[in-house]
Image: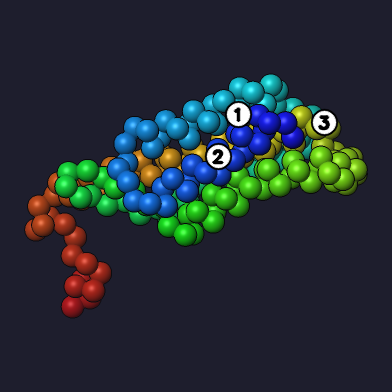
Amino acid sequence: MNTTDWITDIALVLVVFRQLREGRLDLRSYLIPLGIVAFVGSHYLHTVPTAGNDLVLIGALVAAGAALGIAGGVYTRIRESGGHLLIKAGAVSAVLWVLGMGARMGFQVWVDHGGADNVARFSASHDITTGQAWVAAFVLMALTEVVTRLGTIFVRSRLAVRGQQQPASARPAPLLDRAA
């Protein structure tokens, strides 16, 4: 891993730590992570191999990224206060984010420090045709995790705004009140 690799990987991990403290949900909340993954995508994603089982590998990691991103967005608290939406990543959201982003970094460190032969054997026995398939899979996993987390947060923020705009009489009764 070179210096750029370390900086981008660490920046992606640190994005969620910025949200561990409650702050305003604003355009910057969306643009910073999107800017980082746009840089990563343009820097590392040159092709998406389609031979052999390359797309299976890519699809599996993209699905994992989507699951982590949606869950991370669900476990991020969004609330309204003083006319502003506030966001705070919970512990579960932070763990899921670090797990997803850290997996990519951990895999790269492992490959650079003795794991390359194991990956080559696994790739050969599972018909993964090139190392670029692994690069594409992990980059697309990170991109998908970021986009689905932000998408989930955006949808939840719009629902929170809509819930605040409804008069109290139009809001559904809490679950406990419905049972009575």
Circle 3 SS class: loop
Give the quarter of the image for residue 142.
Answer: top right
Q: Residues within 10 Å of mark 1 (few under 14, many from 20)?
A: many
- Farthest residue in the front direction? 3
The one nearer the camera, 178 or 160, is 160
**Label placed on residue 12:** 2
Q: Which residue is pictured at 41% across the width and 47% down the height? A: 19
| Image location (x, y in percent) of residue 79 | 27, 52
Mark 3: amino acid: Thr
Distance between the alpha carbons at the discs numbered 3 and 1 = 19 Å
Q: Which residue is mark 3?
A: 130
> Which residue is painted at 47% across and 59% down in the image?
91
- Callout 2–callout 1 Cβ contact below 8 Å: yes
Q: Is residue 31 left or right of residue 67?
A: left
Q: Nearer the viewer, residue 126 or 69?
A: 69
Q: Which mark is residue 40?
A: 1
What is the crowding at mark 2: few (fewer than 14 residues within 10 Å), some, or many (at least 20)? many
Given the image, on which type of amino acid does mark 2 rest? Leu
Tag in front: 3 or 1: 1
